[in-house]
Amino acid sequence: MKMISRHKPLLILAGVLLLLPLVLPNNFYYDIAIRMAINAIIVLGLNLLIGFAGQISLGHAGFVGIGAYASAILPTHFGWHPLLAMTAGAAVASVIAAIVARPIFRLKGHYLAMATLGLGIIIAIVIKNEATYTGGPDGMAVPALGIGGFTINGEKQWYWVLAGLLLFSFWASKNLIDSPFGRALRALHGSEVASQVMGVDIVRYKVAIFILSAFFASLMGSVTAHYIGFVTPNIADFFHSIELVTMVVVGGMASIYGSLIGAVLLTALPQALSTFEGWETVVFGSILIFCMIFMPRGLVPTLAERFGGRGEDK
């Protein structure tokens, strides 16, 4: 019983993912569900950095772009296998994160925000300017993802791939937060000075979680590129980074469940608001302002505190 109780959220998520295809009427809705899962996985990694470790990143879409273009460039121009290209992209993103993390995380507040924003802008500019390999602003085609002679095609096949990846990411994130590593992240978010006094190597933990979130983002960038079959520099631009951060904030910082809810809501909301012709952005912005005024900690922590008596994800 204790084991079932411990894994209850994971089992609920698995049940939802298994039953969801029964109510999806066509490929359009499968496409939305797939994009929700992709964003949720990226936001899970980003929330570990922002919500649990307390370190802002306004250029995270740059790592998504690295993964996407690695999966486009390496197979197209150099004949690499898509899985090898995906791994290489994640490795490059992790190395870049490791190199820049130490100097960046010596900064605090808006200086830290500007530094991460600058990193994302640099990556986006490189992608746009290296037109020989990236296709420049026009983008480029991405080959299909094949595994052992089997090629993943169609929304239904991609749905099950993303469902499996989302379940694994959710499980891994929950276990990480419940581990000593996760408790150290919570501690340095609460007070870096107190954490240091207690023997926590705050720089090492900041660097490690930055690398992990970059790894998450790069892998999902590769998956996005293969799923869509085409990639443009927009995947790495500033507005995509802000969209990802907004998902973290609206869903709830320091909340694994909030990452899922934020990604689902902000992926579906633009589609739901398409009926407000010409006013979608105004309505969308109004909804976000309403959430931030009345639910400043995010949807999940606020509702949990109000109705369940606890305000954070344990």
Image (tube, rainbow, N blue to C red):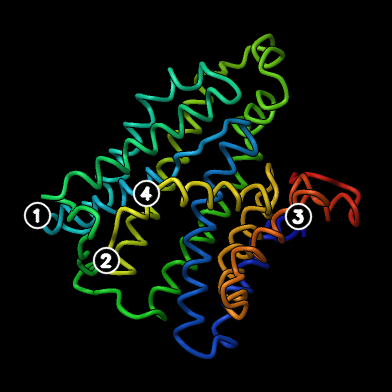
Q: Earlier in the sequence, mark 3 or mark 4?
A: 4
Is there CB contact under 8 Å for labels 3 and 4? Answer: no
Task: Please provide percent x and percent y for residue 241.
Answer: 48, 47
- Residue lying at 37% horizontally and 43% vertically, measured from the top left: 63
Q: Relative to residue 80, is residue 142 depicted above or below?
A: below
Q: Earlier in the sequence, mark 1 or mark 4?
A: 1
Task: Please provide percent x and percent y for residue 40.
Answer: 54, 58
- Closest to the camera, between mark 2 and mark 1, is 2
In this rendering, the count of numbered labels is 4
Task: Give the residue type that dot 4 points to.
Answer: Ala
Q: What is the spatial separation of the Cα atoms under label 4 and label 2, in whole angstroms?
A: 14 Å
In this figure, which residue is indicated by the disc labeled 4? 236
In this figure, which residue is indicated by the disc labeled 2? 230
Q: Earlier in the sequence, mark 4 or mark 2?
A: 2
Q: What is the spatial separation of the Cα atoms under label 3 and label 4, in whole angstroms?
A: 26 Å
Marking on residue 291: 3
Q: What is the spatial separation of the Cα atoms under label 1 and label 4, in whole angstroms?
A: 21 Å
Image quadrant where residue 14 sits:
bottom right
